[in-house]
Image (cartoon, rainbow, N blue to C red):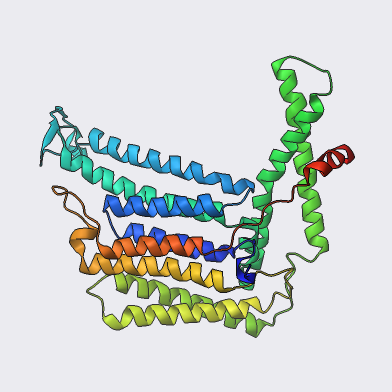
Amino acid sequence: MSPTRLPRDLHPVAWWVWAIGLAAAASLTTNPLVLLLLVAVASVVVMARRSDQPWAASFRIYVWLGVVIVGVRLAFRVVFGAGDVGTVLVPLPAVPLPHWVAGITLLGPITREALLAGLYDGLRLATIVICIGAANALANPKRLLRSVPPALYEIGTALVVAVTVLPQFADSVRRVRAAQSLRAGDTGRIGRLRRFLVPVLEDALERSLALAAGMDARGYGRAGNLGRTARRTTGALMLTGLVGICVGTYAVLDQTAPRWLALPMLALGAATATAGLLSAGRRVERTRYRPDHWRLPELVVVASGVAVAALAWWVGGHQIALAYPDLATVPRVGGASLLGAAIGLLGGLASPPVAAPYRPAPELRGHVEAAA
């Protein structure tokens, strides 16, 4: 087997770039067929490449959340007035409202076009949520936080502690419940709650304090010495970059603004902010244990996500009827959309298989369990 295809975890940033590319493609269209294709691509890749870790099981939650989003969007269309333009399906009466809420109506005739518009909008938002859920299910959150730039070192440290709180609490619940099942005690509901809640909170607090003490002993949260001139330079670069990004983003969205304030200012602001991040990262004097490296599969996954977003942007600018289908016609899928879905699927499957957890052989399993 090729070294690039050996079972291992892909770089978490690569998964996030791939998922953000799918989400960006979903935001550039209301075609339900294209959106369902993107959902299918994300689902297939998650089923093929997710691990046995706890966060990998969160994808179904995002799928159900997407279903709820579509249902709520349709319900809002019905409750707050679907409109009377189009083919009326259910002639509901409209509820008059006071003048201070002009523009909002309750109920009213439900038309096919209004329901389709709500379905398309809800499906687009649901697809974006499902794509982000795919990134959460595929990427290791701890390794992702370990990959943050050195300038965001303190933020990454705090996020590591926050991410480990819930798993520690769940493990405390499991251990306390197993211990209490071996003991007799108060059988009342209040008594059982007190006997269960106090040990869980105490155990979670002790493990959190132990984690904080261990991180402090290893130098977490301590920054290197940086002179006043270097601090002022870093602050000026960050502030200038932020202003440039804000001005460039506004000019890109506002077509009446001068064009030299659009992409050139956005690029200049991003470059200045990057220089500020690099300058701020010099005060962090830490090494990384087993850093994640970028190899060919990571580059392929990232390129596929960028390609999907680029194709969706091209379709939105050159094939508007396919990207935003008319509500009175049956939506169609173009060749560029099919190509983008295929690139996203093949790019995700180009990642190496996930390393399977160690399981002892059947003839050794009994000895291992007995020793445990």
Q: Compared with residue 66, is residue 29 higher up or lower down, i.e. above or below? A: below
**Quarter of the figure with the N terminus:** bottom right
Q: Residue furthest top?
A: 188
Where residue 200 appears, x then y in whole percent?
75, 35
Task: Work out whether residue 192 or residue 33 is closer to the camera in this orientation and state it.
Answer: 33
Q: Is residue 214 left or right of residue 100?
A: right
Where residue 167 appears, x then y in whole percent?
68, 44
Identify the residue at horizontal 64%, vertical 49% (top origin). Answer: 53
* Quarter-of-image position of residue 9: bottom right
Where residue 40 appears, x then y in whole percent?
40, 51
Q: Is residue 371 left or right of residue 221?
A: right
Q: Residue furthest right?
A: 371
Q: Is residue 8 left or right of residue 221?
A: left
**Quarter of the figure with the C terminus:** top right
Identify the residue at horizontal 58%, vertical 83% (top origin). Answer: 233
Task: Work out whether residue 160 or residue 357 is closer to the camera in this orientation and state it.
Answer: 357
Where residue 290 appears, x then y in whole percent?
72, 68
Q: Is residue 163 left or right of residue 335?
A: right
Would residue 20 be seen by someone viewing this image from the given angle? Answer: no
Task: Please state the total of marks drawn on the protein image.
Answer: 0
Task: Work out whether residue 349 or residue 79 is closer to the camera in this orientation and state it.
Answer: 349
Q: Compared with residue 198, is residue 333 higher up or lower down, i.e. above or below? A: below
Q: Compared with residue 104, is residue 150 higher up or lower down, i.e. above or below? A: below
Q: Compared with residue 278, is residue 315 higher up or lower down, i.e. above or below? A: above
Would residue 245 be seen by someone viewing this image from the given angle? Answer: yes
Identify the residue at horizontal 43%, vertical 50% (top origin). Answer: 129
